[in-house]
Image (cartoon, grey):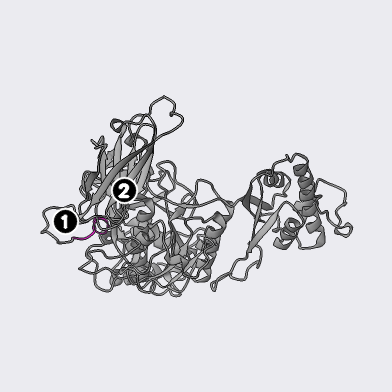
Amino acid sequence: MAEQHPKNGDHAGRSGGSKRTQAAAQTSAGPSETSSVNKTWSEASEANRGTAGVLARRKRQYLVAPRMLADLAASPSNAIHESLKRMEDVEVLRRLRPKGSKGPGATAQPGAQEIIVARMDDQRAEAMRQSAPPHVVIEEDARIETGLSKFPASLAAPRSSRMAPTPRQRREVQFQVLGERDQPLAGASVTVLGRNFGALAITDQAGAASVTILDAEADLDDVGAVYVQPAADHWECFMQRPVLDPAGPNVVRLRPLSPADTAKPAGEKGPAWGRESMGLDQLAAGLTGTGVRIGLIDSGCDNSHPLLRHVAKGVDLTGGSGAKDWTRDEIGQGTHCAGVIAGTGDAAIGVLGIAPGAEIHVFKLSPGGRFSDLIEALDQCIESEIDIVHIGVSANQVSELVARKIVEARLRGVACIATSGDEGGPVRFPGTVPGVLCVSAVGRVGAFPADTRHALTAVPELIGPSGIFATNFSGAGPQLGVCAPGVAVISSVPGGGLAARDGAAIASAHVVGFAALILGHHPLFKGVHASRGEQRVNALFELVLGSAVRPVLDLSRVGAGLPDFRKVAMLGASDVDAWIKTMQDLGVLAGAKQGVGEGFALAGIPPAHPVSAMALMRLHAAGLV
């Protein structure tokens, strides 16, 4: 079918100058701009159709939106939308309209940030990119995912160069997984790794699992490792070069979760190593983060868990059919992170969230979420005036439109704290966006049994004097802000139990809880808690960064270091009051009477170049101001 062309009255045949120049010069929503975009993309459509083959090409989702340029007004979203609707090989799926904010600037340029989600094939998208004016963004609406730390390649036996045999044959290896007092453990995953194969099975109610190896020439001597991960309440087990019985069953006994410190009396639960390492194990009564709103952008949250029954607000943005789909966490990471941030633990359970008084808003984005869903989640965070956002999802692609929404959130007073990713390479997006506090994971020697996979996450040459080590799975790079506990962290998992998990998102959750305590209880924010803006985010992040102690010397692995609540500057009310008065008397602090978080600026420095709160505090502590 032929493409629909602009009507004659749309000035499609206007001459003079290139089509790109004409389109870029339009700054209003008038018909001339609409026709300019229409004509350019219609011609691209004809070229696209001319090279089409017999078979239909696979289509992907794309984001199309106006770009804000210094010398050009944004192309109206309606003009772009109308252009896309005219194209028969493009399906418009939805329009992401900004919901705005109750804060300053909420009504500025309404509609300018609208984003259109469309489906088209790759060749069509590339043709549109080539012909689009400079003020139009066209990018893939890529998948995002939760970061679960992966196996190092060296775990399996060395790979053989021989080809896999054909046809393949089945070989069954039987296992039985038992827990405390030899009780069978259901729902445990048993992974067998060999030269040319990797196979997994889940235990049934009797704790039995049959792992199928699809390799005709596979021998049990070829098995490099067996990894058993329980559903909950037990330590995992990782066995290298195991001796397996081909007749089976091969019995694996797992230890119940308990502190690795054997000096403690049997059954006594000590503070979680992560809380202890961040100076959070002996918080004063009342430091619970009450009044702080936290957005949890992750895989959902099982709020039927005893630690998380107070979590009552959420939304599933992955296309779920029910209003309660956000409570179904298939991956488990969101539930685990929610427990780290705000779990309401007690002495019997032995696990307590860092900021149990904070209000959690859940945004389920995994599995199945895309950049468009992340934009929607951030937009809802702005609308709901969320204070701190935990971004536990990441992608191996970058998005200009997601980055733009994160910047907008920061300007509206939303502090974004993101995982560095679990791929073991560079920091993953959106942890690379300027203004995001990116967090990597560290572990501690002795915080887990030696025969677990946790022990394989350490970078041997990056183990500090205190036993804290950098991990081989966290994203690394200059974008890192701080590090936090992310190895063998015990927290809530779907179904009501506890589990020890690894991941940079878990580290991010620690920093989110840490920041919530500062924002909720530091006197610096008491007078300006409702005064939202970038200045408040700057001050909060400076306090987090300023408290950090570097456990190892590699900045690319740990950033500024591990935050320590005991080192948060000016946490005492009297110290802050004196500091504020001194700054006011010297005329250094601008706008202090209206709110300290609104205007940290030195006299004579333009407001566009704010001086960090932490820098002023250090000058005051040194007696220089």
Label 2 vs 1, first from the N-terminus:
1
Q: Quadrant of residue 404?
A: bottom right
Q: Nearer the viewer, mark 2 or mark 1?
A: 2
Which quadrant holds residue 216? top left
> Is residue 184 shown left or right of residue 89?
left
Q: Is 272 colored magenta in this rendering?
A: yes
Across and down, in percent, residue 229 comes to 30, 50
Dividing the picture into quadrants, the one containing residue 293 is: bottom left
Residue 408, visible in the rendered structure = yes
What distance separates the C-alpha of mark 2 from that of mark 1?
Answer: 19 Å
Above or below — where is 81 with respect to 552?
below
Element under disc 2: strand
The disc at residue 209 is 2
Mark 1, other Cα within 10 Å: few <14 / some 14–19 / many ≥20: few
Residue at the image position 47 percent from the left and 57 percent from the top: 366
Can the viewer see residue 602?
A: no
The region drawn magenta spans 270-278
**Residue situated furthest top in the rendering:** 162
Up the image or down, 154 lies above or below 355; here it is above
Are the residues flagged by discs 2 and 1 in contact, CB closer than 8 Å?
Answer: no
Dividing the image into 4 quarters, which one contains the C terminus? bottom left
Seen from the viewer's position, the closer of residues 450 and 612 is 450
Residue tagged 1: 181
Which is nearer the eye, 592 or 150? 150
Q: Amino acid at mark 1?
A: Arg
Q: Considering depth in this image, is 503 or 71 the residue closer to the camera?
A: 503
Label 1: element kind: helix
Task: Give how far across and how far down residue 354 sits, in percent.
Answer: 30, 64
Left or right: where does residue 336 sit relative to residue 479? left
Q: Where does the image place residue 367, in percent across and percent down from the top left?
A: 47, 55
